[in-house]
Image (spheres, coloured by chain):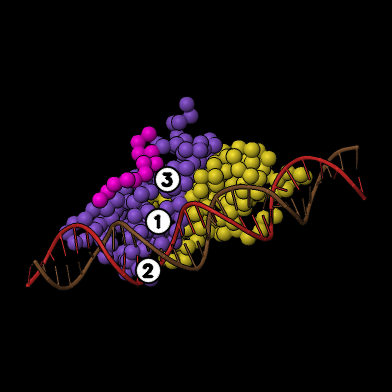
Chain colours: A yellow, B purple, C red, D brown
Amino acid sequence: MSKQELEVVGQDAGCCPGLSAAPLGEDQAADLAKVFKALGDPVRLRLMSMIASRGQGGEVCVCELTPAFDLSQPTISHHLKLLRQAGLIDCERRGTWVYYWVLPGVLDRLAAFLSTTQPAGVTA
Amino acid sequence: MSKQELEVVGQDAGCCPGLSAAPLGEDQAADLAKVFKALGDPVRLRLMSMIASRGQGGEVCVCELTPAFDLSQPTISHHLKLLRQAGLIDCERRGTWVYYWVLPGVLDRLAAFLSTTQPAGVTA
DNA sequence: AGGTTGCATCAACGAACGTCAATACAGGCC
DNA sequence: GGCCTGTATTGACGTTCGTTGATGCAACCT
């Protein structure tokens, strides 16, 4: 169930120097843009927020997410798929229900990428 | 020249509790989504990066930005307009040339919004 | 087995987006 | 004034996106 996801926000090595550290290369920009594009929709932002509110290791059942919107069930499923493909969340089926959670560290790495204050110690 | 811009990322009061603090309301989500959507394009991300690399108070002339892309001049101008409408950058005409800069604090507020570590002191 | 519920996928539609050539506007220079 | 350069705006095009109803698949329950 957890297949093709982006591996963008650098996992360990800190991905990229930061938005304001140096001009982004084409490839980095293309990858990062996919993540921001995934967050660039009100529905997906709310979905992310609802899932992330459960905290580290927390999960949310789709059956809790869908009724929170005035949208059809396929639409919510589609948005969740996009968030998953962007490498922001993952899911697992347990019995009848499917649970989603925020991939650990992604949000903080994104935050670090946007922040203009240097991570300290990278002054070479 | 600097007209209609979004006033989203909260300026002073800290905009919103943070993505993972509490489920986002519809209005907040709609406003924030516009900002992320603006960043959700490779060209705009590179533009932001090129401008932000100049640091606090730094500026970049459009004449330096346009030739960095394999795109027509109107296209770059259009992307710059979107970034401006998202409240991320602003510009000023000086003589023949137009200079762009990153609005102060926006990136750091965005970063704080994404970060999962509480800003401290907001534990009510 | 059949029926039911939860979620994902498919196919199709209109709306929004990214791009360009053409044009308009602003300022400097002659 | 007229010309040239730098930037923004307009109008049009093809592509992508958000949404839906219909359908498919997986797991539970008799």
Residue D28 appears at what percent x and percent y? 83, 41
Q: Main secondary structure of the magenta part?
A: loop
**Residue A33 at least partly seen:** yes
Dot 2: what SS? Answer: loop
Which of the two discs, 3 and 2, labels the residue nearer the N terminus? Answer: 2
Amino acid type at image mark 2? Leu
**Is the residue at mark 3 from the same chain as the one at mark 2?**
yes
Bounds of the magenta span? B1-13
In the rendered structure, the answer to whether residue A15 lies left or right of residue B5 reads right
Extreme top residue here? B124
Tell whether D27 sits left or right of A104.
right
Residue A56 vs D26, above or below: the answer is above
Label 1 crowding class (10 Å Cα cut-off): few <14, some 14-19, many 20+?
many
The residues bearing labels 2 and 1 have C-alpha atoms spaced at a distance of: 21 Å
Q: Which residue is mark 3?
A: B110
Q: Is residue B79 above or below residue B3?
A: below
Circles 2 and 1 on the same chain: no
- At a point 38% along the width and 48% down the height, the residue shown is B86
**Image quadrant in which you'd find residue A70:** top right
**Callout 3 secondary element:** helix
Q: Which mark is residue A19?
A: 1
Q: Residue at x 54, y 42 (%)?
A: A46
Q: Chain of mark 1?
A: A
Residue wearing tag 2: B71
